[in-house]
């Protein structure tokens, strides 16, 4: 089970997530209480081990800006969390090996998520970072061959149930492991990762390729 800890704003929290077994950490460059500047993110990404997938999160940003800021931050992947079109997403995917296209629950475009040129998609509540859970049945609209990352109101206490019900490839959390916006709670991060890894298979579900070395792919 792939686990991404999102909304990282400082090095201590990044190192904490890595030490607890996270596969990925996310940096939010969109307006948010968890927003971080690309240069600040670079100071963190350059100190993380190569096997960690570092993800820059953008929302309705021009592809050229996503590429520029993502490279400045030194992230290996970008997450497009707004109304980016298939063409815009494909343009970004020409510059990053890993691109995650996020869809809000109930988005009419979700059944066509395989037309965006990415292999990972993320399903979230309509308001990102809100800590709100959506109806997990809506995950059935996602194309089954894609790597689905489930987000939206996940916590250490509900992540195992979410994995059992939705059977995602990965899970993502931001506010559910915080003590305040932008500051992670060490115990919650530890419990979230432990519970997610215990609930999911050792290898990423439905995945013939994993585990990955994100540095070389
Ligand atoms: O988290 C934010 O504040 C945010 C703001 C703008 C765009 C994306 C944002 N978060 C992206 C994520 O991947 C979050 O982890 C995801 O929305 C889940 O958040 P939460 O429900 O708080 O776990």
Image: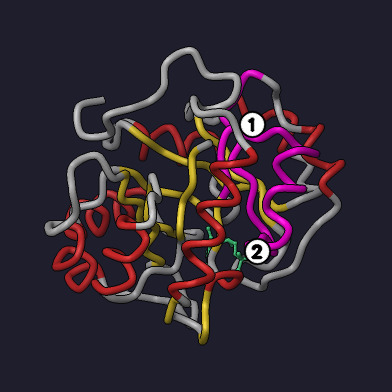
- Identify whether 133 is placed above or below 169: below
Q: Quadrant of residue 29?
A: bottom left
Ligand number 1: quarter of image: bottom right
Q: Look at the image and name its color scheme.
A: secondary structure
Q: Which mark is residue 202?
A: none
CB-based contact (under 8 Å), mark 2 and mark 1: no
Instruction: Give the number of the mark in front: 2 or 1.
Output: 2
Q: Quadrant of residue 97?
A: top left
Element on which disc 1 rests: helix
- Does the beta carbon at disc 1 come under 8 Å from ligand 1? no
Identify residue for label 2: 155
| Place of residue 163 in the rendered image (x, y in percent of width and height, measured from the top left) | 70, 41
Q: Is residue 160 inside the magenta stretch?
A: yes
Which span of residues is magenta-colored?
145-171
Q: Residues within 10 Å of mark 1 (few under 14, many from 20)?
A: many
**Which residue shows up at 13% across the image and 59% down it?**
47
Q: How many marks?
A: 2
**Which residue shows up at 49% across the image and 77% down it?**
32
Horizontal side of residue 170 vs 152, given as left or right: left
| Place of residue 205 in the rendered image (x, y in percent of width and height, measured from the top left) | 59, 25
Horizontal side of residue 58 vs 131, given as left or right: left
Q: Quadrant of the C terminus?
A: top left
Horizontal side of residue 45 vs 115, given as left or right: left
Identify residue for label 1: 113
Q: Nearer the viewer, residue 55 or 95?
A: 55
- Identify whether 166 is placed above or below 3: above
Distance in Å between CA atoms under marks 2 and 1: 26 Å
Q: Residues within 10 Å of mark 2 (few under 14, many from 20)?
A: many
Q: Which of the marked residues, 2 or 1, is nearer the chain's N terminus?
A: 1
Element on which disc 2 rests: loop
| Place of residue 16 in the rendered image (x, y in percent of width and height, measured from the top left) | 33, 66
């Amino acid at each position: 089970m792939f686990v991404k800890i999102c909304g990282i704003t400082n090095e201590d929290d990044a190192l904490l997530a890595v030490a607890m077994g996270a596969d990925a950490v996310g940096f939010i460059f969109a307006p948010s209480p968890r927003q971080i500047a690309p240069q600040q993110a670079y100071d963190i990404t350059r100190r993380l081990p190569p096997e960690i997938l570092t993800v820059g999160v953008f929302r309705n940003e021009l592809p050229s800006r996503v590429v520029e800021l993502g490279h400045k931050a030194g992230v290996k992947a970008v997450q497009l969390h707004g109304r980016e079109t298939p063409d815009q997403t494909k343009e970004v995917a020409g510059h990053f090996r890993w691109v995650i296209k996020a869809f809000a629950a109930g988005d009419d475009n979700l059944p066509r998520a395989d037309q965006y040129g990415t292999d990972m998609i993320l399903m979230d509540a309509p308001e990102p970072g809100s800590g709100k859970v959506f109806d997990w049945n809506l995950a059935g609209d996602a194309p089954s061959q894609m790597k689905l990352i489930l987000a939206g109101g996940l916590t250490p206490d509900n992540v195992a149930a979410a994995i059992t019900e939705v059977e995602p490839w990965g899970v993502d959390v931001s506010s559910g492991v915080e003590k305040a916006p932008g500051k992670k709670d060490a115990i919650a991060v530890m419990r979230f990762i432990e519970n997610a890894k215990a609930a999911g298979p050792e290898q990423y579900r439905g995945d013939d390729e994993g585990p990955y070395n994100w540095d070389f792919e």
